[in-house]
Amino acid sequence: MESITKNRQSLDTLRAMVARAYGADAVPAGDSWVDELGNGFFNVVYRLTLADGRQVALKIAPPSDVEVLTYEVGAMRTELEALRLITAHTGVPVPAVDFADLGHDLVDVDYFFMPYVDADNLGVIRDELGPSDLGRYKAALGAANRELNTILGPAYGPVTAPAYSTWRSAFTALFDGVLDDGRRRSVELGWSYDEVRAVLTAHEHLLDDVTEPRYVEWDLWEGNALVTDGEVVCLVDHERALFGDPLIEVGFAGLLSPSFGDSTAFLRGYGRGPLTESEEVRRRLYTLHVGLVMTIETVYRGHTDQEQYDWARECVDEVMTSLTRGRPTA
């Protein structure tokens, strides 16, 4: 996926980064040791073959002069903290961090190296799988997600700086942040920004039902799962992690919005029963939030086709209609 947030580097810079991380002897010769992995939507990720034959992955944050969404500021440091938490508190398979550079002297953004995991991306191969195989993988993602949600945080909000005493205040800040991002770039939502904000105001008291700040991955979809031989062997891309309500996990989105797919297998693996009426409203608010993010980010990332924007606009309309029982007026 092409995006202006992908911060590609020259071979000379990549060599210098490898030398800093692994030593001068690890720097390969020639120019055939670099492959860009194209499945990501935000950061550029390279597969590098070092001089001794080892394969590693290098992830580089977006260029410092490219505007990102409010919640994406400092996303790589969020991911590094998420990886630390997951490794320390669960058995969920995630990449090890070989080396992280947050100094900005070699390149002016954060980057880190990890071992390359030679496996299939579930989001890429899902259409090649039969229903039973895909269902097993989705159930495994549900089980892994449940384990991630066992991590308790000190407060609500991003894992690098949980700063809110209630989930209501943390989610409201997230929601308002993305609305501000949309206003700043005049992104058309199909509803007025005031109408969208009024929907949250009308239902935000239900967020107070959440009383424990639990680790939330938020972005655990098939494209962030690496699989091989019927097993989920690694989960990647943890830059959206926060402490909050596990019901915001994207795996639950299909329960009330068919456009997100079927959540049956995920729910089976997670081991969760049906939603209560209050939980259904919370889940709709979370679906509205992700629809807003996916609509507005297309402008920030410079997408040149309308596919994601059109799909996300339909998602926003679907949820707004369900929560207002009316029709859009803008």
Image (cartoon, helix red, strand yellow):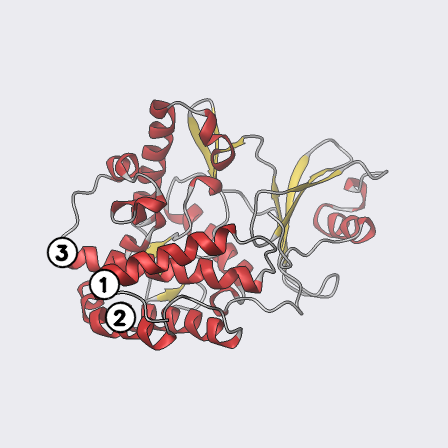
Q: In the image, which is nearer the foreground, mark 2 or mark 3?
A: 2
Amino acid on which the number 3 mark rests in the picture: Glu
Residue 284 position in % (x across, y down): 26, 58
Badge 3 density bin: few <14, some 14–19, many ≥20, Cα 10 Å: few
What is the number of the mark on residue 199?
2
Amino acid on which the number 2 mark rests in the picture: Val
Taking the image as shown, residue 30 lies to the left or right of residue 204, namely right
Nearest the viewer among 261 and 265 is: 261
Nearest the viewer among 92 and 185 is: 185
Quadrant housing the C terminus: bottom left
Query: Are circles 1 and 2 on residues that touch, CB within 8 Å?
Result: yes
Specify the quadrant of the image occupied by residue 190.
bottom left
Q: Determine the residue positioned at 34% across, 28% down.
A: 136
Label 1 belongs to which residue?
A: 323
Q: Determine the residue positioned at 42% across, 66% down.
A: 189
Nearest the viewer among 9 and 327 is: 327
| Secondary-structure class at tag 1 | helix
In the picture shown, does residue 131 fall above or below 206? above
Say whether disc 1 or disc 2 marks the residue closer to the N-terminus. 2
Whether residue 213 is visible, yes or no, is: no
| Secondary-structure class at tag 3 | helix
What's the CA distance linking mark 3 and mark 1? 13 Å
Whether residue 187 is visible, yes or no, is: yes
Query: Are circles 3 and 1 on residues that touch, CB within 8 Å?
Result: no
What is the number of the mark on residue 277?
3
